[in-house]
Amino acid sequence: MNSITPIPLRPAPDRVAFHRTELGVILSLYGRFVAAGEWRDYGISSLRDVAVFSVFRRTAENPLYRIEKRPKLRAKQGQYAVIGAEGQVLKRGHDLKSVLRVLERKLIRAVD
């Protein structure tokens, strides 16, 4: 017989994931960029040592930005980082909101 495998609601203990409050902050920023027509798609990865929120302009492209959470760097450089399309670290720190400000600056435009 076919058996139904339940989907776990929590990630496995050996994986890093974003907390609900962290996702709320990230998705709020994502929604503003979607409304501005800049971003169209995203992807979330929960890996062994890093959780990644990738932002895409189009679905078939490489990500424009990656927002990473690396808990092992919590005591050193900070567990959050925003990484650009070419792999350069745009901002790293301990507070997610302050790290995401580097992207918010790109949303502000001059109005004629």
Image: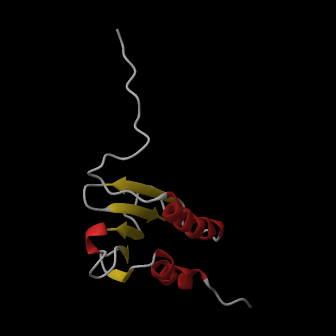
Q: Nearer the viewer, residue 10 or 41?
A: 10
The reply, left or right, for residue 41 in relation to residue 51 is right
Where is 71 relative to 111, above or below? above
The reply, left or right, for residue 106 in relation to residue 68 is right
Instruction: Identify the image quadrant of the C terminus.
Output: bottom right
Q: At x 34% / y 54%, what residue is drawn?
A: 46
Q: How many marks?
A: 0
Render colour scheme = secondary structure
Residue 53 screen position, x and y as percent: 42, 62
Q: What is the quadrant of residue 54 in the picture?
A: bottom left
Residue 24 screen position, x and y as percent: 56, 62
Q: What is the quadrant of residue 80 in the picture?
A: bottom left
Q: Residue furthest right?
A: 112
Q: At x 31% / y 46%, what residue is drawn?
A: 12
Q: Nearer the viewer, residue 104 or 106?
A: 104
Residue 105 screen position, x and y as percent: 55, 85
Q: At x 39% / y 68%, what residue is drawn?
A: 66
Where is 26 relative to 78, above or below? above
Q: Nearer the viewer, residue 89 or 18?
A: 18
Q: What is the quadrant of residue 45 in the picture?
A: bottom left
Instruction: Identify the image quadrant of the N terminus.
Output: top left
Residue 76 screen position, x and y as percent: 26, 81
Q: At x 37% / y 25%, what residue is drawn?
A: 5
